[in-house]
Image (cartoon, rainbow, N blue to C red):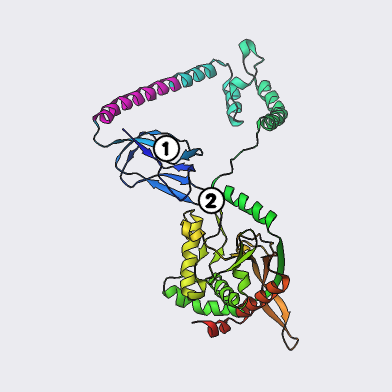
Amino acid sequence: MSDFLLPDIGEGIVECEVVEWRVAEGDQIEEDQPIVEVMTDKALVEITAPEAGVVTKLYVAQGQIAKVHAPLYAYQVDGDSQAESETPQSAADDTQSERSAAASTAESTSAAGRLYNKVPASPAVRRLVREHSLLLTEIAGSGKDGRVLKEDVLAHLDQAPQAAASSKQAAVKTQTENSATRVEPLRGVRAVMAKRMVEAASTIPHFHYGEEIDVTALLALRERLKPVAEAQGERLTLMPFFMKAMALAVAEEPIVNAQLKTAGNELHYYPQCNIGMAVDSKAGLMVPNVKNVELLTLLEIAREVGRLTTAAREGRVDQADLKGGTISISNIGALGGTYAAPIINAPEAAIVAIGKTQWLPRFDDQGAVQRRAIMTITWAGDHRFIDGGTIARFCNAWKGFLEAPETMLLHLG
């Protein structure tokens, strides 16, 4: 019998939570078969079997914490004679237990039947009892030797509504008295999110700036390009346009892509634009980022957005995809929100929350009312070194590329 030790599953990770066992004790397993899913403070990790065998013991229960380099489960390698000899005995024990349970059930059923048959009642009364889905044993008989009469059945029916109401009230009271608040430990990605959001909100002075963007032309361009992207196996959403326009706007206001370092007395300006996108995954909020957006085509960005979104929703984002972000986007509008006040993903300097797009009436240059697609956005900037004017100029540049998306062609390499 061998113990499987929890291996190193990430830099600096010393423990993780067991999310789900895919096997139980006594199960036959094959080499590379998924055995368990564990959650670190960064991602969900699937652990597979090193070789074929039989699981003999699970050392860590689901929902508990496992330590790196400590035994996670025990297994017996295939071909072990002891495992083979124990199997028939276990089967025999199971068979004996099943027979005992069946015998016990049969005795209970027989006893219930005898009790029912002892209650004296006429055929007419028995029919009345059946029509109202009652049991004779529930009705107190007033006749000779406890015989149940028709009057007894009718009296029982009159008392039933009141008894049911009292029973319901008693059940509600009992449930209220016995109910307890469900307690769930804050672990994994959610624990990290809680810590980082508190730090960001309490240590970074946020400056918020809201705007409306007319994306009518952008939506039309996307519809024209969707078939081209689909022909190459890519799903073209608005996110690649948001990211590409943002990378172009950063070139005009590079301080928005900078970070404050060394106890707050140095600004580091990054040449690459690594744009993060907030994803609402089953493990909690994750913000993977697309690297070097300024160098990628819209199709390449779409491919990365699809890959990262799928990985994040499954809780299987690589550590490299979560590191090195320089600015972030939160597309809350995908869930229906119109406005949001985002919290900066430290140590980044800015984040934008994108609201849902609505078709609204707007005046054109000649004063005529037109139907336009209006998207609301809200920026949050690190007010220690980004002022309102900087955010406004940066947002105007970004807005210009989105409202007239063909102008992005002038800046593409």
Image spot of residue 40 (x, y percent): 50, 47
Regarding mark 2 in the picture, which secondary structure is present there?
A: loop
Residue placed most toward the observer, 219 or 70: 70
Q: Is residue 90 left or right of residue 122?
A: left
The image shows residue 121, relative to residue 9, as above or below, that is above
Q: Is residue 308 left or right of residue 126?
A: left
> Image quarter for residue 107?
top left
> Image quarter for residue 345?
bottom right
Q: Which residue is mark 2?
A: 283
Q: Which residue reaches farthest top?
A: 145
Q: Give the magenta-colored segment's residue range.
A: 81-105
The image shows residue 401, relative to residue 281, as above or below, that is below
Q: Give the label on residue 70, or none.
A: 1
Instruction: Say what amino acid the circle numbered 2 marks.
Output: Ala
**Residue at the (65%, 37%) spot, across then down:** 181
Image spot of residue 157 (x, y percent): 68, 27
**Image quarter hosting the N terminus:** top left
Which label lies toward us, 2 or 1? Answer: 1
**Mostly what secondary structure, the magenta segment?**
helix
Verify whether residue 83 appears in magenta: yes
**Residue at the (41%, 74%) spot, across then down:** 232
Query: Could you tell me if the residues under marks 2 and 1 are in contact, i.e. CB atoms within 8 Å?
Result: no
Image spot of residue 401 (x, y percent): 60, 79
Residue placed most toward the observer, 384 or 100: 384
Q: Residues within 10 Å of mark 1 (few under 14, many from 20)?
A: some
The total number of labels drawn is 2
**Residue at the (68%, 79%) spot, across then down:** 371
Instruction: Say what amino acid the circle numbered 1 marks.
Output: Ala
Image spot of residue 143 (x, y percent): 65, 14
Q: Is residue 363 left or right of residue 303?
A: right
**Residue at the (48%, 20%) spot, across then down:** 108
Verify whether residue 84 appears in magenta: yes
